[in-house]
Image (cartoon, rainbow, N blue to C red):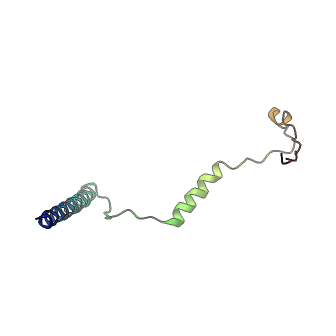
Amino acid sequence: MLRLVWRALFIAMALVFVASAVVVLLLVTALWALQYLWGHLSGRPVSPMRTYSAGASWSEMMRQADRFAPKPRRAGSAEPEAAADVTDVEVKKISPP
């Protein structure tokens, strides 16, 4: 009797898993169909998935990094006042206790 209960429980769990997989598949198909329909209505080219280009991402990152590069100083410009407040630090040796 207990084997029958376990078998019915596992079959029910498998049916729930398959049903949820079918629902996910239907949702993805519906989203793709909606994208296809919107592409035709708006006149844009239709592609089922977004593409990723590592080279384009690298170029974009390098282009963004150029904005934050330090600007070259002119030869006659004075240092900022904050640089005058900086003092050197002496290295201390740490001795074991």
Q: Quadrant of residue 38?
A: bottom left
Q: Quadrant of residue 3?
A: bottom left
> Residue 29 location, x and y as percent?
23, 62
Q: Residue, x 52% and y 63% (percent of image)?
A: 56
* Quadrant containing the C terminus in the rendered view: top right
On screen, residue 23 versus residue 64, left or right, reads left
Q: Is residue 48 above or below residue 76?
A: below
On screen, residue 33 versus residue 63, left or right, reads left
Camera-nearest residue between 30 and 13? 13
> Which residue reaches farthest front?
1
Q: Residue, x 16% and y 61% (percent of image)?
A: 9
> Residue 70 location, x and y as percent?
72, 48
Camera-nearest residue between 30 and 12? 12
On screen, residue 33 versus residue 65, left or right, reads left
Q: Residue, x 60% and y 56% (percent of image)?
A: 63
* Quadrant containing the N terminus in the rendered view: bottom left
> Residue 87 location, x and y as percent?
87, 37
Q: Residue, x 86% and y 34% (percent of image)?
A: 84
> Residue 25 location, x and y as percent?
23, 62
Camera-nearest residue between 56 and 93? 93
Q: Quadrant of residue 86?
A: top right
Total residue callouts: 0
Q: Is residue 19 above or below residue 82?
A: below
